[in-house]
Amino acid sequence: MKARRPLSVGKRLETPGDWLRHAEKQYARHSVALGQVATTAHDEALYLLLHTLGLPLDSKPAVLRRKLKAGEAGRLREIFRRRLEDRVPAAYLTREAWLGDFRFHVDERVIIPRSYFLEIIPEQLPHWLPEKKPVKRVADVCTGSGCLAVLLAHQFPGAKVDAIELSPDAMAVAKFNVATHGLGRRVKLFHSDVFDAVPKAKYDIILSNPPYVPTRELRSLPDEFKTEPKMALDGGPDGLAVIRKLLRQSVDRLQPHGIAVLEVGGLRAAVDRAFSELDPHWLHTGDGEDCVCVFHARKLKNRGKQSASRGATPRSA
């Protein structure tokens, strides 16, 4: 790893606005990787600045003009040193992440929440389900911090939510977040490799943001992303290992009208090739990435019947 440039504080920085402008320049100087908390240096630096100073995230611009109090400059210097020199992701520094209006505890035990499901769950999922049929049960596979299970519970207030996770460390974080959001009675946590250890149940929705980074690509990730748990990122040789298992097990887990909805990052072409007979439908997202796909229970069931009629030996789950 090449040596880091030391954090430069050349002039006197007397206000939060001074620090914000300075930090933006330092982000560029240090070639910081973004995307875990914010997509621009300005937004991430502002978030860190406000959090470190104990100011509301919706503070008015005037707050940037106030004089710093004793000790505040030192705290800002240290937080930006850790972010820029040590490459600690902002969410691990603040121990929190936001999806819309929902705040979640995060630390190095879990991947930092960032998901297109924030817009997909309220805006598009309901259109894929029978209009007058209430959603009774949903599953969030590879729940990590539990954030998507919480979003699902809020979107479908009459539904039970099964949150499934293989990592015991991530399970502990998810348990904390579920309790913090007051959803302990409706969101049930399962320590399981996909559905292996989950009691039989039929779901209206199976949702997942699974590990999908091909193993060979992990080495080339920016340092900030390498601090996240490998288990939450590594999708096997082609990135599809967990996805294959999830779709295979979803055949017997979905209601006849049910759907499996997966976020797959840059694997759209790979998913289309590997599962063409399942006719994956790609949902549109605001930024045009369109990396969330829907599989209908009917297609999954037909594929299972075809495999059985050919006498295919299913791969081990």
Image: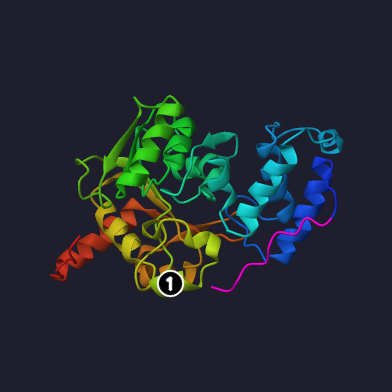
Closest to the observer, 99 or 7: 7
Which SS type dominates the magenta stretch?
loop
Position above or below: 259 against 60: below
The residue nearer to you, when weighing 273 against 303, is 273
For image coordinates 35% across by 61% down, the residue present is 243
Instruction: Say left or right for 176 vs 4.
Output: left
Compare residues 86 and 164 and report the one nearer the observer.
86
Q: What count of labels does the image hold?
A: 1
Q: Residue at x 68, y 63 (%)?
A: 6
Q: Which residue is mark 1?
A: 270
Q: Secondary structure at mark 1?
A: helix
The range drawn in magenta is 1-10
| Quadrant assignment for the C terminus | bottom left
User: Quick check: 220 left or right of 316?
Assistant: right
Count residues near mark 1 (Cα–Cα under 10 Å), then give few for <14, some for 14-19, many for 20+: some
Instruction: Indicate yes or no whether the magenta region holds residue 8.
Output: yes
Q: Quadrant of residue 143?
A: top left
Residue 52 percent coordinates (x, y) = 66, 39
Q: Position of residue 288 (x, y in %)?
A: 63, 60
Q: Quadrant of residue 102?
A: top right
Task: State which quadrant residue 304 falls in.
Answer: bottom left
Kind of residue at badge 1: Ala
Q: Residue at image x 58%, y 74%?
A: 2
**On the picture, is 224 further left or further right than 286?**
left
The answer to which of 236 and 251 lies nearer the viewer is 236
Q: Which residue does the image show at 78% across and 33% down from the upper left? A: 69
Q: Position of residue 149 (x, y in %)?
A: 42, 39
Report whether residue 28 is seen: yes
Q: Is residue 286 at least partly visible in the picture?
A: no
Residue 164 higher or lower than 239, as above or below = above
Q: What sort of colour scheme is used for the picture?
A: rainbow
